[in-house]
């Protein structure tokens, strides 16, 4: 999807006939590592109670499914994880949108500033629309993660943009930075 990156093993959504298998997979992982004393990994020292469902599932080189397929996957994973242990926290896919999100400026204007040799602009429009769709699924995640892969000021604009989207959808949830480095997009 971008001109810069190629991934050898991107993620695909399970076919409909395998969604039950995926649900069982999520339940079993949560149960094995939740530290509740029921079917836990032998000698488990520290429980794992937080899971991110996919990464950069906006349709990038990590995820080959659609935004709709991701939201379906998210719902299945959330229900399965919470059934295994209600204390588990589900993190929405880590967003990466470069430094094109700025609450004070339309994202379309920022995307048009991208160098087409490095970034396919139509993909960035798709990414933003995917994030907006994901953020509407407020009942199927507990926290939001974004990837800060540009200069640090983009953290502030990304957080503010995510907060605005959540507010428009009538909720507020914790926001975390996942991957981090300093390589400006614009």
Image (cartoon, helix red, strand yellow):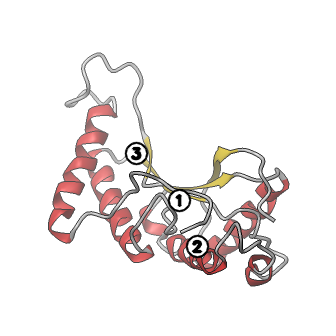
107 lies left or right of 8: right
Secondary structure under the numbered disc 1 in the rendered image: loop
Q: State the image coordinates of residue 93 (x, y, percent, origin top left).
A: 50, 58
The residue labelled by disc 2 is: 127
Along the line of sight, the residue nearer the viewer: 49 or 179 = 179
Task: Name the side, left or right, on which 143 lies relative to 82.
Answer: right
**Circle 2: element type:** helix
Q: Nearer the viewer, mark 1 or mark 3?
A: 1
Query: Could you tell which of marks 1 and 3 lies nearer the N-terminus?
Result: 1
- Residue drawn at the location 67% of the way across and 67% of the way down: 162
Mark 1 = which residue?
Answer: 56
Which quadrant would the C terminus be assigned to in this image?
bottom right
Q: Residue furthest front?
A: 117
The CA span between labels 2 and 1 is 9 Å
Between the residue at mark 1 and the residue at mark 3, the CA separation in whole angstroms equals: 21 Å
Q: Is residue 31 above or below residue 149?
A: above
């Amino acid at each position: 999807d971008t001109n810069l990156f190629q991934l050898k093993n991107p993620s695909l959504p399970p076919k409909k006939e395998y969604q039950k298998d995926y649900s069982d997979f999520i339940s079993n992982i949560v149960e094995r590592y939740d530290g509740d004393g029921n079917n836990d990994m032998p000698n488990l020292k520290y429980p794992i109670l937080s899971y991110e469902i996919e990464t950069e599932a906006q349709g990038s080189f990590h995820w080959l499914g659609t935004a709709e397929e991701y939201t379906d996957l998210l719902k299945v994973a959330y229900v399965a994880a919470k059934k295994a242990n209600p204390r588990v926290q589900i993190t929405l896919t880590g967003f990466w949108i470069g430094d094109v999100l700025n609450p004070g400026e339309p994202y379309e204007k920022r995307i048009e500033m991208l160098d087409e040799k490095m970034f396919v602009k139509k993909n960035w429009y798709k990414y933003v629309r995917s994030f907006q769709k994901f953020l509407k699924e407020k009942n199927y995640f507990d926290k939001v993660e974004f990837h800060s892969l540009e200069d640090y000021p983009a953290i502030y604009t990304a957080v503010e943009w995510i907060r605005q989207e959540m507010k428009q959808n009538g909720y507020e949830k914790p926001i975390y930075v996942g991957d981090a480095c300093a390589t400006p997009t614009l």
